[in-house]
Image (cartoon, helix red, strand yellow):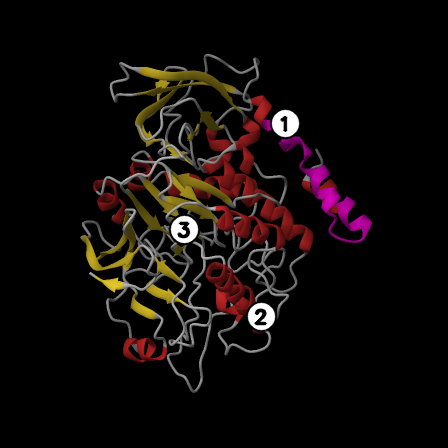
Amino acid sequence: MLNDKQFRSAVKHEGGVSRRMFLAYSAALSSIPLLGRSSFANAAPEFSSNPFSLGVASGDPDSTSMVLWTRLAPEPLEPFGGMPNEAVVVRWEVADDEAFNKVVASGTVAATPQLGHSVHVEVDGLSPDQWYFYRFHTGDATSPIGRTRTFPAVDTMPQQVRFGVTSCQNYEQGLFTAYEQMARDNLDLVFHLGDYIYEYAAGRNGKVRTHHGKEIDSLNDYRARHAQYRSDPLLQNMHATCPWLVTWDDHEFDNNCAGEISEEPNIDPVDYLIRRANAYQAYYEAMPLRASCLPTGPDMQLYRNSRYGQLADFLVLDTRQYRSDQPNGDRKSPLNDAAFDKRQSLLGRRQKGWLYSQLVSSQSTWNVLAQQVMMGMVDRAGNPEAPAYSMDQWPGYAFERMELMKFLADRRVSNPVVLTGDIHSNWANELRLDDRRPEDDVIATEFVCTSLTSGGNGVDKPKGLDNLLAANPCVKFHNTERGYIRCAVTPQEWTADYMVIDNVETPGGNTFVRNSFTVEAGQAALHSS
């Protein structure tokens, strides 16, 4: 495999950024899953400190399987996590009980230096709709115990699913206290909708605690930043409580990135994509993702579906990697011709085709789009005389957004619900073909979760709230407190509790329900409960 210097030289010699050269640069990654079955791994490693310092996690469950994750890192903030340049044998177990008296599956896998000694075990052959416990061993060390579950069989109708929705957890701007209440909520699943880490240099947002190192760029930089976040005991505990479905936004790589275009001017496109390759590999290493998500250089497919019986289809989207550049200089602006340009896309052609295919073939009661940026066409200025819409969100791609709404209505997709992060504030929105026309039929519902910590302590009633609500009839609730959304979904009804925390800047914050909304199956309108 070419090193960075050789790769830059080869690409520039060809006179541009070459996808073929990127594939050559990263070809060795395709063989990494095979390394996990290598017979050359060290079966009796010795560690100077706990190799399971980053805890355990599970994710991407279906009715018979899920991914179990850990990463060996006795010195998590050091290069390579303090691990030697060799593969290490890791044993794993899955049991019906927390005491591991009834082990139902077990095996070994090699944690390789090529993937930062991360472990992704895809356990199959389990029973549908059942809770399990899991753990890892290497050398004489044993990991914490995690709890996970399979989804119900695809031909059954579950009576309920309960899950949390979170995003935007800037380590410097707050404590992860809200995860304490989330763990007590006894959820089946957690959605994390992006900005799991922030790429900024130490001290840029420092108010509560401090990032490790400079603005991250290299693979080791991204690995260390993920490790710093995952070292938080409250985040670790929440990962060990239930499976997660994750997707990224921009800060896992670089703020307000758009496809292959940097937010900053005069960025060498080769340097940009090499940095993206580093970010994507570190993200895969840090998350409970299947091998189907393994990155190839600067490309990584995160859009995927997960079916909870016939109750809900969860469609996880990626609105960063494939999007065209934000119009109007990525500044808030009116919905002008640039925002309605037919060539503008958040999804990209292939993901859009996949999404439409999934929606039209779905037989589930609820169809859930778990994605990053707000879909509601919200005038953020709250001023009909001088409206201002975010060009980084769906209004900047208004044609594609309205096309999607029309598709949902024309194909009579059952109960579409959009889950959104990114914006560091809570919103409950009714979505129409054109949200500026309140007389139109409501087609879908959007629940936007605030940040877990980003932005520091917020407020219940932000300045100008009355004007914003008056200018945007689609918005039924908005505030800027921190927290997450707790959802309970049945065949008849969806309930969303907006959980907020009164203080993220000091220990001991109290998390409580600020507002709740329900949606009845067959009726997209929001009802305050």
Q: Which mark is residue 327?
A: 2
Q: Which residue is mark 1?
A: 31
Between marks 1 and 3 in the image, the one whose residue lies nearer the viewer: 3
Question: For the point 50% across and 77% down, which residue is it?
Answer: 333
431 displayed left or right of 240? right
Disc 1 crowd, CA 10 A, few/some/many (<14, 14-19, 20+) = few
**Residue 134 visible in this rendered orientation of the protein:** yes
Q: Position of residue 358 (x, y in %)?
A: 51, 47
Is 417 covered by the magenta stretch?
A: no
- Tell me if residue 502 comes above or below residue 313 in the rendering: below
Q: Is mark 1 in CB contact (under 8 Å) with mark 2?
A: no
What is the distance, in whole Å, between disc 1 and disc 3 at their CAs? 34 Å
Q: Is residue 350 above or below residue 49?
A: below
Q: Main secondary structure of the magenta part?
A: helix
Residue type (three-letter) at the residue carrying disc 1 = Ser
Q: Residue at x 44, y 80 (%)?
A: 387
User: Disc 3 marks which residue?
Assistant: 368
Mark earlier in primary sequence (1, 3): 1
Q: Secondary structure at mark 1?
A: helix
Q: CA distance from mark 1 to mark 2?
A: 39 Å
How many C-alpha atoms fall within 10 Å of the one at disc 2: few (<14), some, or many (≥20)? many
Residue at 36 percent across and 75 percent down: it is 472
151 in relation to 479, above or below: above
Magenta region, residue range: 9-32
Q: Amino acid at mark 3?
A: Val
Kind of residue sitting beneath label 2 = Pro
Q: Residue at x 54, y 32 (%)?
A: 291
Image location (x, y in percent) of residue 258? 57, 59
**Along the line of sight, the residue nearer the viewer: 52 or 471:** 471
Secondary element under disc 2, as helix, strand or loop, is loop
* Quarter that holds the N terminus: top right
